[in-house]
Image (tube, grey):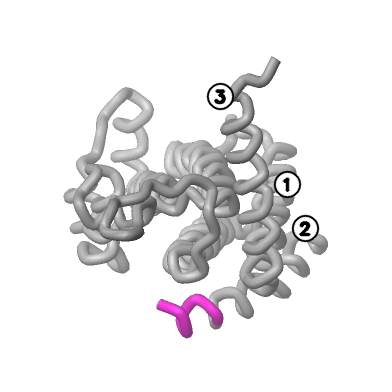
Amino acid sequence: MYNPLLAKIAALRKDEMRTARKSRREFKKEMSFLEETSDLFLKTFDVLSNEVTQEFTESEDACYRISFRIYRILHCATSCSLKGYYDVSMALLRIAYENHLLMNYLSKNKEEAKLWFKGKRFAPSYLRQNVSYASDSLYQEMSEFIHSSFKSTFFFTELEMGRTKATLGEFSRDKFKNVLPLMLMTMATTIILLSLTFAQELMRNEEWHSTFSQIIPEMWKYIKEKL
């Protein structure tokens, strides 16, 4: 028996798959960066997981734990973008950005890291004031997609014949271009912060160091050109 709801779900999945194919085809360089950096994250976790975590300082342990969370968020943001859910990806990137600022702050403040393990929370505004490269304008831009502002709705609606049409799983080159540099920037800066926090553990691993040296400088050059 024909089920119209199941038919719509099947059509949506086809749209999402079509969007993913278009995204990979039109953004080959960027997708290569994303995949290579994702692999580098996993290599980093693999190297650090072989260390005795009890020997980490509170700052190092906090940095290590939060980096896992950032990776998970970025993994979901990538999946959303590939399926055409660009507004959801932007909201996730705001969360990842907050986590990155916290990771940076705690990596440099051992006493604060001790309090974090005891449950202390740090307001996003406080972190932006205390992390040198934090950007209020970038944070506000991404916040538009957390709070469902009118601006954010333009990422999933369009006018057609004078009527507002909601889009699901549809490819948009311009919207994907807005998301990609922010995603790559968060990935690169998090990996760099991990490399600084765990320089001794990571740099002595030749495979990790070689991969890092090949990927990050080229990716960082791309980011500076796009942002």
Q: Residues within 10 Å of mark 1 (few under 14, many from 20)?
A: some
- Tell me the CA gap for discs 2 and 1: 8 Å
- Label 1 SS: helix
Which label was assigned to residue 5? 3
Question: Mark 2 or mark 3, which is nearer the start of the sequence?
Answer: 3
- Label 3 SS: helix
Residue found at the far right of this picture: 207
Q: Quadrant of residue 135?
A: bottom left
Q: In this view of the protein, which residue sits in the foreground, 140 or 203?
A: 140
Q: Is residue 28 magenta?
A: no
Q: Quadrant of residue 148?
A: top left
Residue wearing tag 1: 47
Q: Amino acid at mark 1?
A: Val
Position of residue 80 in the picture relative to residue 36 (left or right): left
Position of residue 39 in the picture relative to residue 109 (left or right): right
Residue depicted at 65% across the width and 51% down the height:
41
Q: Position of residue 159 (x, y in %)?
A: 31, 59
Residue wearing tag 2: 205
| Residue 201 visible in rendering | no
